[in-house]
Image (cartoon, helix red, strand yellow):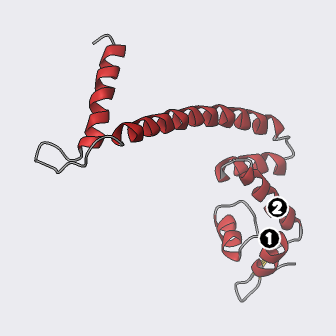
Amino acid sequence: MLTIHELAKRSGVAPHVVRYYVRIGLIQPAAQKENGYRLFESKEISRLRFIRMAKQLGFTLNEIRQITRHADEGDSPCGDVRRIIQHRIKENRAKIEQMEHLQSRMEEALAKWEGMPDGVPDGHSVCHLIESVEVEEDIIDSSSRGG
């Protein structure tokens, strides 16, 4: 049987992470001593390593809990794992496209600003650099909507 510190050391995670995973139900102590020390079976080392690998693949702790629950019940979680990762790949691709679009807008704005002087706020303007981009985007947005 392993204490939290022993389990943490052997599985390569911090003790506070072990405590947190116990608190949210990802791992369970096998016993608890009279002094309050929780004791774990060595199989929890594998569980903690699995959790770390799943997190590195982008699974959330709730998803990992779902996956391990299926496994604990003797059901294969592999179908869920495939569906979750397929969904996450689509989400990531959309985020990457949004970030690439943002990067382009930022680079275009900076290039435009190179030739513009610094301005002083006058009560109608906070920073004419940013406001120059918003005006252009408003024109582009309204023309693309047919307005």
The residue singled out by tag 1 in the image is 12
From this viewpoint, which residue is outermost toward the front? 115
Position above or below: 16 against 51: below
Residue found 69% across the figure and 67% down from its top: 22
The quarter of the rendered structure image containing the C terminus is top left
Residue 105 horizontal/vertical position (percent): 44, 35
Mark 1 belongs to which amino acid?
Gly
In the rendered image, the residue lying farthest to the left is 123
Residue ranking furthest to the top: 146
Q: Residue furthest bottom?
A: 35
Marks 2 & 1, CB-CB < 8 Å contact: yes
Is residue 10 positioned above or below 142 on the image?
A: below
Give percent across and percent down for residue 107: 46, 39
Q: Which label was assigned to residue 136?
A: none
Gap between marks 2 and 1 measured at Cα? 8 Å
Counting residues from the start of the chain, the first of labels 2 and 1 encountered is 1
Q: Position of residue 11 (x, y in %)?
A: 82, 69
Q: Identify residue type, mark 2.
A: Arg
Q: Is residue 134 above or below residue 147?
A: below
Name the element at disc 2.
Answer: helix
